Structures are given as C-alpha cells and as structure tokens.
Image (cartoon, grey):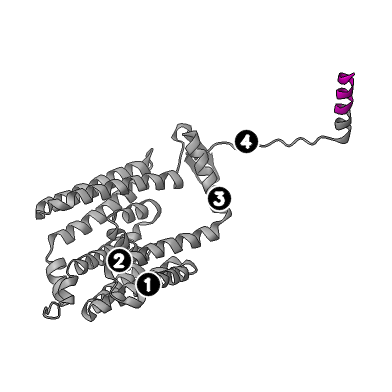
C-alpha cells in the first residue's frame, strides 16, 4: 500500500506542476474520443468524418472551457445527424437545446454531462458519469444526468434505426421514432431510473459522516444500477444485453475505485476529535487525515577544501 500511496503522491505533484498542460491534454483526449465515437456511429457527413478534422476540432476544444467544448461536440454530432436525415437532426437539436436549458436553469455544475453520458453510452459504460458526478459534483447535477440519459437513448435508437432513414422508400420520421422507441418503451424509463437512483445513492452516502463513505457509495450505486438494468432486461426479454450490462457495471466500479484513490485517500486509522470555542459557540470537529507518506529529505553534504586536503594527507600517510 505504501508503494501505491507514494505513486499517487508523485502523480499528483506531476499534475500540479503541469496543471495547465494537463487540463488541456485531458480536454483534447476527451474531445477526440467523443468525436471518434460520433464518426464511428454517425459518420454520415464525409467532410467531418476525416481524422484530421477530428484532430482540429479536438485541438480547439483543448483551449476552451469544457462546457463550451461540449457545445462544439454537440454541434458536430447534430450536423452528422442532419446528413442522415434533416428530421433526425432537427429533433436532436431540439433535445440538445432543451437539455442545456434545463441544466442551466437548475445550475448543474457539469453541463457537459449532456454529451459525456452519450459518449460513455457508446463505449458501454454509461454509469461512470453518475459515479463521477456523485463523488465530485453536487446535487444539481441530477438535471444533467436525466437530460444526458435522454440524449444518449435518443442516439441509441437513431443508431439502431439508421437503415430505415437511409431507405428512401421508408417514410419513418424522428417524431414517430421518439414515440415508438422512447416514450412507449419501458426500457427507456428503466435506464433513466438506474442512472438517477445510482447518482442519488452515491451522492447521499458521499455526504454522510461515515467511514469509507465514498467506497460504500460507489459499491451500492454500481450494484443498484446493475440490478435495475438486469431486472429491466429480463422484464422486456432482452437477455442478450445482460453480459454487456454486467461488464459495464464492473468497469464502472473499478473506475470508481480509481477515482476514490486519486481524489480522496483518507486514513481512518488516525481520526482526531477537536473541540474549541469562541464567545458564542462550542465547536466539535472530527478531523480525518489524508493518507500520505512523509517525503525523505535528501541531505547534501558540502566538502570543503580543508577536508579534501586532510583526506589527501591521510592517504599519503597510509601509503608510507
């Protein structure tokens, strides 16, 4: 354990010493992943599907705030859907505008969850966003969880029915798709319930004054999300999706533990109770120290010319 704590300390220092470059690099990588997912699943606009276009857009996102970067990525996705069907693109635009309006109204801390959930859904780990928001965000992020889940599910049904829009003889519309595949689909509500309940459990336990609250929150949140999705898959008869749900929940749990390791790391074996007072109040404080390893101070010894001459004289006497 000492090795891992020491490694974490070194990584934290490296990040802090290169904070600006690290933030820009993270934004670039996340934007590139999002654009790669869009091109792989909805690459209908050829001009935007080139790898060099993705690099340019990701580079732009690296130098602007994350919220603005999510808007750029959403715009690229909407243009791609417009190439598939104007109807589908307009519906996506309306959903995106409503999602950003709702998250702005409720003052969500991370509005980019509207895009992040859609991206994580494409790589089969959608529950990682409720875990991150539950551990590091605030309660207002629930609006982003709901809106992002709606966006993700809409893109899912568009992807599954893309062939119908490409068939010129088929007169399916985006409104019909939303009605039949989302509003009338039981799995749509089960998916949103799993996302919201998982987020609420993690956030609630994280804010409680109990030992290992973060670990309990991630564990209970991931298990609950898996159970809800498993029950939903069995209820609608989609047993083939169970392995994907299980692997996604397992990956989410492991990533959650990794987040706890880097962002919390408390030493519950050295809890201290502190009491003090002022003119009006008594204060009772529970202090939990962070787990860290004391750095070894390097001792630099300077050798003077006199000491060097003394060593040389000793060597001469020994030689005689």
Whole-percent x, y for residue 124 in the image: 27, 55
Residue drawn at the location 53% of the way across and 43% of the way down: 9
Closer to the chain start, of discs 3 and 1, is 3
Residue 57 vs residue 113, the one in the foreground: 57
Which residue matches tag 1? Answer: 50
Q: Is residue 310 left or right of residue 178?
A: right
Q: Which is in the foreground here, disc 2 or disc 3?
A: 2
Closer to the chain start, of discs 2 and 3, is 3
Q: Secondary structure at mark 3?
A: helix
Q: Which is in the foreground here, disc 4 or disc 1?
A: 1
Q: Secondary structure at mark 2?
A: helix
Whole-percent x, y for residue 7 in the image: 51, 41
Tell me whether the residue at label 2 lies in contact with that at label 3, contact meaning CB atoms closer than 8 angstroms. no
Q: Secondary structure at mark 4?
A: loop
Which residue matches tag 2? Answer: 40
Which residue matches tag 4? Answer: 296
């Amino acid at each position: 354990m000492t090795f891992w704590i020491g490694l974490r300390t070194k990584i934290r220092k490296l990040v802090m010493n290169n904070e600006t470059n690290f933030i820009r690099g993270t934004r670039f990588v996340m934007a590139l992943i999002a654009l790669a997912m869009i091109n792989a699943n909805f690459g209908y606009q050829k001009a935007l599907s080139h790898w060099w276009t993705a690099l340019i857009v990701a580079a732009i996102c690296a130098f602007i705030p994350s919220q603005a970067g999510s808007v750029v990525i959403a715009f690229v996705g909407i243009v791609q859907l417009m190439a598939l069907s104007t109807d589908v693109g307009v519906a996506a635009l309306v959903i995106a505008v409503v999602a950003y309006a709702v998250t702005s109204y409720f003052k969500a801390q991370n509005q980019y969850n509207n895009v992040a959930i859609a991206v994580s859904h494409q790589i089969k780990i959608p529950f990682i966003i409720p875990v991150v928001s539950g551990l590091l965000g605030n309660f207002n992020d629930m609006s982003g969880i709901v809106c992002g889940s709606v966006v993700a599910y809409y893109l899912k049904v568009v992807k599954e029915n893309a062939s119908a829009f490409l068939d010129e003889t088929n007169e399916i519309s985006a409104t019909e798709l939303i009605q039949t595949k989302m509003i009338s689909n039981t799995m749509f509500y089960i998916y949103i319930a799993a996302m919201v309940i998982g987020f609420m459990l993690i956030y609630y336990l994280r804010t409680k004054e109990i030992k290992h609250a973060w670990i309990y929150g991630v564990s209970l949140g991931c298990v609950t999300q898996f159970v809800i999705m498993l029950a939903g898959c069995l209820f609608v008869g989609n047993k083939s999706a169970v392995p994907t749900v299980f692997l996604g929940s397992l990956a989410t749990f492991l990533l959650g533990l990794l987040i706890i390791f880097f962002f919390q790391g408390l030493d519950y074996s050295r809890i201290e109770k502190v009491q003090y007072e002022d003119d009006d109040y008594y204060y009772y404080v529970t202090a939990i120290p962070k787990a860290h390893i004391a750095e070894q101070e390097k001792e630099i010894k300077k050798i003077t010319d006199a000491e060097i001459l003394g060593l040389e004289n000793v060597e001469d006497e020994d030689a005689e």
